[in-house]
Image (cartoon, rainbow, N blue to C red):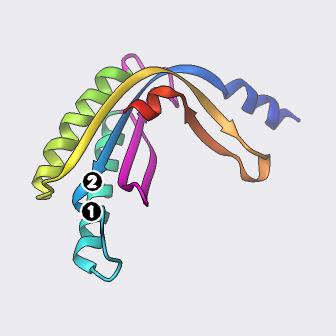
Amino acid sequence: GSQNAMSMLLNELRPVAIVFVGLHDLDDIDPRDSTLLQLMNEAFKTLSRITHACNGAVRDMLFDDKGCVFISVFGAHSHEVNPCFDATVSAMRMESALKDLKLKRFSLGVSFGECFCGEVGPSMRSDYVVMGPEVNLA
């Protein structure tokens, strides 16, 4: 009842900024290579800290057939004053941090636009999503 009504109020189109990081040095990681696994973990922890310090939220940390990917979103969880500024500062800090970790092959993308932000799925297994062309554009 009231829980569903509250969730519906939080589902909306919002102006958000997305930061996408492709960690290409880690694309073909061997799960038996503990050194690379530690580097991947350190990269994800570092990128998460930067995201949170810049008022963002971690959307995904993935390792799949597309490689090693980190996605953060700015403005989805609150009506921030300037999610574009926060995302841009975050991306610049991420670039510096990845170089400090000695990663040589990575890509960074930043996009901005109106996206659907909210919960989808049944109440027992719902997920907070940010969907829109801007997510894929970054």
Span highlighted in magenta in the image: 55-82
In percent of width and height, residue 114 lies at 51, 19
* Above or below, 96 relative to 56: below
Q: Amino acid at mark 2?
A: Leu
Q: CA distance from mark 1 to mark 2?
A: 6 Å
* Residue at numbered disc 2: 23
In percent of width and height, residue 8 lies at 75, 28
**Residue at the spot x=31%, y=76% of the render?**
30
Q: Are marks 1 and 2 in contact (CB under 8 Å)?
A: yes
Quadrant of the rendering where the C terminus is positioned: top left
**In the image, is residue 70 part of the stretch drawn in magenta?**
yes
In percent of width and height, residue 62 lies at 43, 56
* Residue at numbered disc 1: 26
* Above or below, 64 relative to 11: below
**In the image, is residue 111 part of the stretch drawn in magenta?**
no
Q: Residue furthest front?
A: 65
Counting other residues with Cα less than 10 Å from the Cα at mark 1, is it few (<14), some (14-19), or many (20 or more)?
A: some
Location of residue 131 (image quadrant): top right
Q: Amino acid at mark 1?
A: Leu
**Residue at the spot x=55%, y=34% of the render?**
130
Location of residue 5 (image quadrant): top right
**Residue at the spot x=17%, y=48% of the render?**
97
Counting other residues with Cα less than 10 Å from the Cα at mark 2, is it few (<14), some (14-19), or many (20 or more)?
A: many
SS of the residue at dot 2?
strand
